[in-house]
Image (spheres, rainbow, N blue to C red):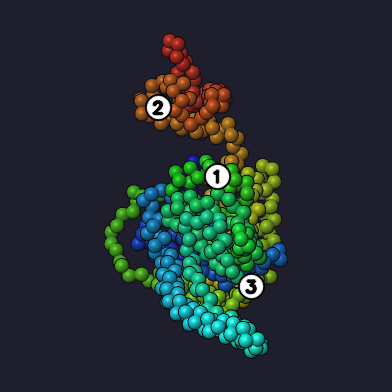
């Protein structure tokens, strides 16, 4: 992962007015980074909508609207505060489900005892008739009808999940049209789960697989049909760095990382001055109400049987614009193009744009087809994430690895010069403690800096030292 630098503000003004006002309200009260707030809001919308609608892309592909988010922020950026505020209706919904489950479980245990008692009576009648060599046809019909009335074990459905294995993930999605969200303001809990070390299930859920299966011993088979899943992880940089060290190559190579909208917004710490505080929320209650309404609608429709999700299509004007944007992105994938080093992510950017446009359209209760305006708003947001993905996981456009290494070493040396009054630095100590290894790579970078008069190498006795050159620190 490349080192963080100052990034532009999140395109908050691209959001529908009611969501933009919500972001500004949370910013005023919590003073967290804008991207952190926006990504939390969009992930909550994704979680609430994913079970009810799909989107038909202009390419003819029917896709889920579910979206994955990864927010990178240091401790103290108020991740927990934002998550608690934005995701409150999701947690409340799961709590209500848990209460309902306990009620259903108590009723099930009672109904099961009654059913078992009747079952025993029928068994006795059947045994007696068979022993007396009498006809059992009527009893068998009664038993068949009785079997159909056997109480169904209630299921505890939870939308919110954290530490989960791949097997538990499929079990959570078992059935038809089940929906979950992997969400945590402490991303280490999610990243440590075994489901985040193998990515085929995540990829298939994101792609809208019609069926997921898991075969277990003794003839047990788990089947998940038309599942939906959103991911929203807030994680500290050091935790993500450790995760990437172990699993980064597989996450990128499997295509999982290309399915995630990432962001590492600049810190607001040190600038969160408080002059007054108003406890009243103006826009948050409406947002909570909308999320709650969608989750309850999902539960109601799920209880009635397999859900037939509404399909959202784009207007003719939006389709025309879609084609132009798709060609624009495609041209930048060419060699030496801006997106060439992140082709995996950029290739999915227009699908992400379509998903996000559908989410904004549906959540704000727009009528008809997805509008050109919704598409433009979504594309503005996705462009921000494209730049973030390139900054964090791509090679800087037009910058070779040697140049990037030279910049990193020069910055490290500059820090040491500043601390020791510009005294020469022992060459081997910089190799041992600095950012560039092995020695062959370090030598090449030093030669590059020397050729550019950034530094020069001199001897004091038998030891070699690094000195400032005339162009040190210059662009």
Residue 142 appears in view: yes
Q: Residue at the location (49% across, 69% down)?
A: 157
Q: Which residue is mark 1?
A: 247
Query: Mark 2 vs mark 3: which is more N-terminal?
Result: 3
Classify mark 1: residues with Cα within 10 Å, few (<14), some (14-19) or many (20+): some
Query: Mark 2 vs mark 1: which is more N-terminal?
Result: 1
Left of 7 or right of it: where is 30? left
Element at label 1: helix
470 to 389, vertically: above or below:
above
Rounded to the nearest whole Å, what is the CA distance between mark 3 and mark 1?
36 Å
Element at label 3: strand
Number of the front mark, 3 or 1: 1
* Percent coordinates x, y for residue 181 in the rendering: 51, 62
Left of 331 or right of it: where is 400? left
In the displayed image of the protein, which residue is found farthest to the left? 276
* Percent coordinates x, y for residue 172 in the rendering: 53, 64
Q: Which residue is mark 3?
A: 311
In the displayed image of the protein, which residue is found farthest to the top? 461
Q: Residue at the location (41% across, 48% down)?
A: 74
* Percent coordinates x, y for residue 204 in the rendering: 63, 58
């Amino acid at each position: 992962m490349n080192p963080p630098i100052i990034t532009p503000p999140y395109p908050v003004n691209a959001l529908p007015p009611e969501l933009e006002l919500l972001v500004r309200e949370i910013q005023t009260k919590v003073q967290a980074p804008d991207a952190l707030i926006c990504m939390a809001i969009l992930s909550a919308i994704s979680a609430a909508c994913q079970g009810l609608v799909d989107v038909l892309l202009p390419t003819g592909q029917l896709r889920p609207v579910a979206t994955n988010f990864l927010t990178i922020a240091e401790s103290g950026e108020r991740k927990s505060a934002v998550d608690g505020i934005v995701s409150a209706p999701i947690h409340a919904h799961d709590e209500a489900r848990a209460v309902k489950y306990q009620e259903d479980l108590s009723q099930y245990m009672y109904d099961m005892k009654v059913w078992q008692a009747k079952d025993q009576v029928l068994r006795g009648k059947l045994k007696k008739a068979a022993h007396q060599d009498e006809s059992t046809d009527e009893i068998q019909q009664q038993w068949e009808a009785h079997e159909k009335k056997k109480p169904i074990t209630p299921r505890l459905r939870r939308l919110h999940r954290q530490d989960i294995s791949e097997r538990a993930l499929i079990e959570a999605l078992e059935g038809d049209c089940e929906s979950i969200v992997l969400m945590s303001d402490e991303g280490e809990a999610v990243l440590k789960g075994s489901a985040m070390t193998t990515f085929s299930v995540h990829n298939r859920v994101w792609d809208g697989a019609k069926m997921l299966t898991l075969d277990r011993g003794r003839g047990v088979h788990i089947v998940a049909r038309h599942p939906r899943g959103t991911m929203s992880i807030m994680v500290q940089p050091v935790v993500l760095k450790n995760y990437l060290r172990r699993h980064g190559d597989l996450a990128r190579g499997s295509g999982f990382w290309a399915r995630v909208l990432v962001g590492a917004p600049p810190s607001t710490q040190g600038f969160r001055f408080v002059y007054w505080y108003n406890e009243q929320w103006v826009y948050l209650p409406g947002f909570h109400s909308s999320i709650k309404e969608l989750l309850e609608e999902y539960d109601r429709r799920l209880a009635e049987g397999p859900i037939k999700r509404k399909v959202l299509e784009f207007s003719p004007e939006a389709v025309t614009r879609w084609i132009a944007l798709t060609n624009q992105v495609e041209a930048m994938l060419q060699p030496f193009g801006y997106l060439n080093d992140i082709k995996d992510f950029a290739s999915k950017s227009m699908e992400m744009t379509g998903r996000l446009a559908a989410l904004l359209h549906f959540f704000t209760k727009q009528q008809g087809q997805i509008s050109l305006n919704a598409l433009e708003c979504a594309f503005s947001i996705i462009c921000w994430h494209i730049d973030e993905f390139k900054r964090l996981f791509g090679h800087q456009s037009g910058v070779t690895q040697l140049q990037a290494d030279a910049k990193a070493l020069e910055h490290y040396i500059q820090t040491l010069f500043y601390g020791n009054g510009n005294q020469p630095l022992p060459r081997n100590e910089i190799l041992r403690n600095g950012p560039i290894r092995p020695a062959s790579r370090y030598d090449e970078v030093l030669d590059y800096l020397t050729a550019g008069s950034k530094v020069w190498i001199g001897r004091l006795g038998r030891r070699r030292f690094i000195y400032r050159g005339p162009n040190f620190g210059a662009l």
